[in-house]
Image (cartoon, rainbow, N blue to C red):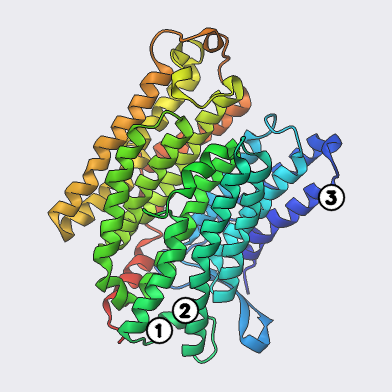
Amino acid sequence: MTSHLLSLAIWIPIFAGFAVLAMGGDRNAELQRRIAFVGALLGFLVTLPLYTGFNTASSGMQFEEFRPWIERFNVHYHLGVDGISMLFLLLNSFITVLVVIAGWTVIENRVGQYYASFLFLSGLMNGVFASLDGVLFYVFFEATLIPMFLIIGVWGGPNRVYAALKFFLYTLAGSLLMLVALLYLYSKSGGSFEILVWHKLPLAMGAQKLLFFGFLLAFAVKVPMWPVHTWLPDAHVEAPTGGSVVLAAIMLKLGAYGFVRFSLPIVPDASRELAWLMIALSLIAVVYIGLVALVQTDMKKLIAYSSISHMGFVTLGFFVFNALGVEGGLVQMISHGFISAAMFLCVGVMYDRMHSRMIADYGGVVNTMPRFAALMMLFAMANAGLPATSGFVGEFMVIMAAMKAQFWIAFAAATTLIFGAAYTLWMYKRVIFGAVANDRVAKLTDLNGRELTVLGLLAVAVLAMGVYPLPFTEVMHASVNELLRHVALPKI
């Protein structure tokens, strides 16, 4: 019997988005919020059986769905997940629920369109993680730009149009070379868009290198890797809180996911040949961008640069070519999803009260918001890689994997533990501790029930993954080992 769980995970949020839009204008805002919450919650609930019913011993695709779509060109609606992709559907659907709750009383204009954009985005990103057809992947991959463009451009800050256009043009331009690469693979495979068929395709080294750079530009912009990272701080600063949360927690993962689904298995010889380049770019992101984060005066911009530095760990783990590194990179992606979401929500809580993101405008927040200060301390420590938090697990695994490859790579990567602690705790100290800085801080109120629920759920996730990461890592083992076995075999 064919499972339809993946289709439900994709289309429930999208249909819920249409239902929200059908409710009309802001006069029905409360009903729109409730429909959005029900749609997001159902979208999350249908992903849970993906985990509970997952066969951890199998390295192949599970919960597959296959339907003809554009038969003339052999394009199919083909879905499936393995141990590499399955957790990202759960993460995406979970974060969507939190974003809906977080915006409940904050968004007052165009409420229906706001929630519909997030629901569409959730379904489309699930489609990216579940696609096994090249055209289907590309359609979902590109379609995610539209809701995020609207979220930044409509509900963002004063420079939102500039930030939205920069985000859109950077990511769209990067993806065009990927389209050329997909069409080349289609022609070389005898007219198939099946990603799993492409994994077995013999390719000459010259062709592999060209394909590698085609994929690299598309995925590096999404991650984003240095030097194509400059759109991210602008997008984060101008985006509303919910937009920053989804952008950091999920959208950045689309690029990193592309490396393990396309670059490594389709062009393994070129991936090994050019691993030095990927490692160099990753280390620049870890070290240089960590230093850039140290000098930021805007909390959102600091966390944005922190995200680039932490995602450098992900690409580093993938290209040291051992199981610990790849699993560490995947764990870091999940962990960063929790921590970055929490950090941006913390900034959002303060921004809703003070309408300022500048570190200098705060000070002494612990005196008026003790519960908030305690939770933000946990997330700041996790961002700095404190043991027993999720932030430590992935970074430790990647550093261990890098140590197996070369000591100096591990040494350079480990500097992020110092820089991460420096910029995160510097921000936390200036904002939270000390005497009350001004009258506006003195009038702050502590977390309400809605905010406490959202941050509390993320705190549980961060601690659970940090203390007991096995449930997150055991589902990856078989698929990661199969991927590395495949990458080790020459295709030339």
What residue would you read off at disc 2? 196
For the residues carrying marks 3 and 2, which lies nearer the camera in this image?
Answer: 3
Say which residue appears at 13% left-offset and 53% top-offset. Answer: 407
Are the residues flagged by discs 2 and 1 in contact, CB closer than 8 Å? yes
| Earlier sequence position, callout 1 versus callout 3 | 3
Q: Is residue 25 left or right of residue 165?
A: right
Separation of residues labelled 3 and 2 (CA atoms)? 39 Å
Residue 218 versus residue 101: which sits nearer the camera?
Answer: 218
Q: Tell me the CA gap for discs 2 and 1.
A: 7 Å
Disc 1 target residue: 200
Residue nearest the viewer, comparing 486 with 228:
228
* Residue 59 can be seen, yes or no: no
Residue that mark 3 sits on: 22
Place of residue 240 in the rendered image (x, y in percent of width and height, measured from the top left)? 60, 37
- Please tell me which residue is depicted at 61% across the width and 41% down the height of the picture: 160
What residue type is disc 2 on? Leu
What amino acid type should be assigned to the residue bearing mark 3?
Answer: Ala
**Do we see residue 281 in this rendering?**
yes
Determine the image quadrant of residue 352: top right
Q: Residue at x 34, y 72 (%)?
A: 482
